[in-house]
Image (spheres, grey):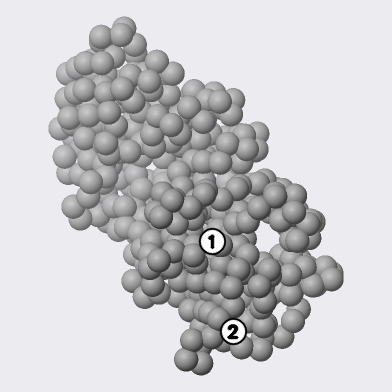
């Protein structure tokens, strides 16, 4: 067995006799088992390891939630339902998956800036916590609850007056479609009290995909301070505080993995302070990408090898319609290659620079630009790492009418 550790994203992945192993299954055997390419494969052992790492480094009193938006594959959601403390959902479809997986409604939070009346009604009927994103949503929720005779469970999502610097995607600070501006929250809380609604607490999320532990620690402290100030305005003690997440994973060679131990130290202080100030409050950490991102691969087969004016192109049966993020069209300002290998030629030395492209009729369908790779032939398998989060369901699968890829939990 060998371990590829030349890129931080490849750490821990094993190979045997030149083949990448997924769940200890050689990649060509897995492809035959799946029956077709392309496919996404998620490794159970890596998911277990990541949950164990989080449990070891984070304070015991912290409640760990999985954000289903990162990867809603049903088998994966069911697998995680037995290993995390709750789910966060952002649509009625995700809510159904959470409930189908057996997660108790009391352990589900429903966020999102555009909940329809139907979705709010479903959330009320299920008894999940609704994380309200505006004064208008609060008014609609109140009216719908009265119509069906339900008592809503409510938290307010707050758009803080600070940012998580260095985030791949900013979700707080400045003008946002997400949440209630912190300065407007006192009036919304007063409106809720006037309507006879009990607000249990807050959801404060400043940004995602951050690899700087010190920045995350700073934002967690600011988040707690803001929540405690707002808690003084509630009609009853705070019972819920979603601290967001924002933990990043290394996609590119210069990325360094997040210092989870340092984040855990900061969270221990946050949780202790919260317990002293608001002993009934349940602190929640909401993670998606950090739990599943590094456990997933996208596997696609080379169907043509061509040379165009001296440049090598490996044409595959996959593409951006399955994995938009790998093509650089999902939030990258400067396009960079996701880590990838010729998965049935592990250990072979790089021999050429080749671009890996998909089967779509657009130059945007570029999975790797001039990557240093072993020589690949028709029939070889390309595996793209860091593909467990925001892969299939974040991609334009209907584009050009190709079949959807398979997904397997190995």
In this figure, which residue is indicated by the disc labeled 1? Answer: 318
Q: Nearer the viewer, residue 5 or 309?
A: 309
| Picture residue at 43% right of the left edge, 51% below the top | 401
In this figure, which residue is indicated by the disc labeled 2? Answer: 372
**Can see residue 343?**
yes
Q: Earlier in the sequence, mark 2 or mark 1?
A: 1
Residue 379 falls left or right of residue 95: right
- Quarter-of-image position of residue 75: top right
The location of residue 9, given as percent across then percent down, is 60, 68
User: Mark 2 Cα within 10 Å, few/some/many (few <14, many 20+)?
Assistant: some
The location of residue 182, given as percent across then percent down, is 22, 44
Residue 170 falls left or right of residue 81: left
2 vs 1, front mark? 1
Above or below, 308 relative to 28: below
Above or below, 71 relative to 131: below
The location of residue 208, given as percent across then percent down, is 40, 56
User: Mark 1 Cα within 10 Å, few/some/many (few <14, many 20+)?
Assistant: many
For residue 400, which numbered disc appears in the image?
none
Circle 1: element type: loop
Circle 2: element type: strand
Above or below, 78 relative to 394: above
């Amino acid at each position: 067995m060998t371990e590829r550790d030349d890129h931080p994203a490849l750490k821990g992945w094993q190979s045997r006799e030149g083949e990448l192993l997924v769940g200890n299954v050689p990649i060509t055997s897995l492809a035959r088992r799946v029956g077709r390419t392309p496919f996404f494969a998620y490794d159970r052992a890596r998911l277990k390891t990541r949950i164990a790492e989080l449990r070891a480094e984070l304070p015991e009193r912290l409640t760990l939630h999985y954000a289903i938006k990162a990867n809603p594959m049903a088998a994966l959601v069911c697998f995680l339902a037995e290993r995390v403390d709750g789910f966060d959902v952002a649509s009625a479809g995700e809510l159904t998956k959470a409930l189908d997986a057996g997660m108790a409604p009391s352990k589900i939070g429903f966020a999102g800036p555009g909940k329809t009346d139907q979705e709010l009604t479903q959330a009320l009927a299920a008894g999940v916590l609704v994380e309200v994103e505006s004064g208008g949503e609060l008014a609609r929720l109140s009216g719908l609850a009265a119509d069906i005779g339900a008592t809503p469970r409510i938290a307010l999502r707050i758009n803080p007056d600070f940012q998580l610097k260095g985030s791949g995607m900013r979700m707080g600070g400045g003008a946002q479609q997400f949440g209630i501006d912190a300065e407007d929250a006192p009036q919304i809380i007063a409106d809720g009290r006037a309507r006879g609604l009990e607000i249990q607490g807050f959801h404060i999320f400043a940004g995602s995909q951050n690899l700087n532990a010190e920045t995350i620690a700073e934002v967690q402290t600011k988040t707690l301070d803001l929540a405690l100030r707002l808690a003084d305005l509630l009609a009853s003690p705070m019972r819920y505080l979603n601290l967001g997440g924002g933990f990043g994973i290394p996609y590119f060679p210069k990325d360094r993995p997040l210092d989870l131990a340092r984040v855990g130290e900061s969270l221990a202080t946050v949780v202790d302070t919260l317990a002293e100030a608001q002993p009934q409050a349940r602190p929640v950490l909401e993670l998606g990408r950090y739990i599943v991102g590094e456990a997933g691969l996208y596997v696609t087969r080379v169907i043509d090898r061509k040379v165009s004016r001296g440049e090598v192109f490996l044409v595959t049966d996959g593409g951006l319609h399955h994995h938009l993020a790998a093509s650089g069209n999902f939030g990258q300002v400067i396009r960079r290659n996701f880590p990838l290998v010729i998965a049935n030629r592990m250990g072979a030395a790089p021999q050429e620079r080749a671009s890996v492209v998909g089967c779509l009729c657009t130059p945007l369908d570029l999975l790797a630009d001039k990557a240093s790779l072993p020589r690949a032939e028709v029939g070889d398998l390309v595996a793209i790492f860091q593909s467990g989060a925001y892969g299939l369901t974040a991609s334009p699968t209907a584009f050009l009418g190709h079949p959807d890829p398979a997904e397997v939990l190995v």
